[in-house]
Image (tube, helix red, strand yellow):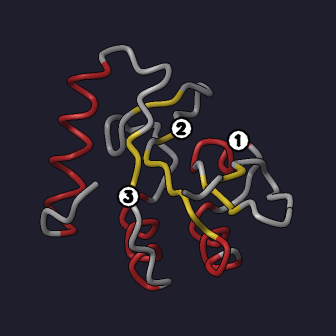
Amino acid sequence: MAIADHSVPPVRREGVGIGIDPPAWLSANLDPSKACMENAVRMVSARLSDLLSTGHRAPIAARQHAQLDWSTYGFTLAAIGYQRAVIIDARQWQNPWQGIEHTMTVWNQVFGGQPI
């Protein structure tokens, strides 16, 4: 079992992997895709949600004020060979079940139904 630290920037600790939470990186004005590239070797967790300009979390591609370039994020995960689960993070979503379905549909249209 892997333990992931999702802090921004990541803290390197023996026995603890790195998790990327896109809204956390975006709220710090940092690029989550770049974070994946820079931490590929230690990355054990990838969350999937967006950050609106209002500061609230949301499903990917849900609104015009979304900040995550989710397709680049997904292609970056593929490029670094990330093969663990991509975790849909529905915290703060107004309608989590609808948002999860939307996120899965959008993600699977590009990434061919790969497990998320």
- Residue 76 position, x and y percent, is 47, 76
Label drawn at residue 85: 3
61 or 24, which is in the foreground? 24
Q: Badge 2, how many Cα within 10 Å: few under 14, some, many 20+? A: many
At 57% from the left and 68% from the top, the residue drawn is 33
- The amino acid type, in three-letter code, at marker 2 is Leu
Under circle 3, the secondary element is loop
Q: Amino acid at mark 1?
A: Ser
| Label total for image | 3
- Find disc 1 in the rendering and name its residue: 27
Say whether disc 2 or disc 1 marks the residue closer to the N-terminus: 1
Q: Quadrant of residue 101?
A: top left
**Circles 2 and 1 in contact, beta carbons < 8 Å:** yes
Q: Where is residue 72, by image quadrant?
A: bottom left
- In the rendered structure, which amino acid carries the disc numbered 3? Ala
Q: Check the image and report above or below for 66 versus 15.
A: above
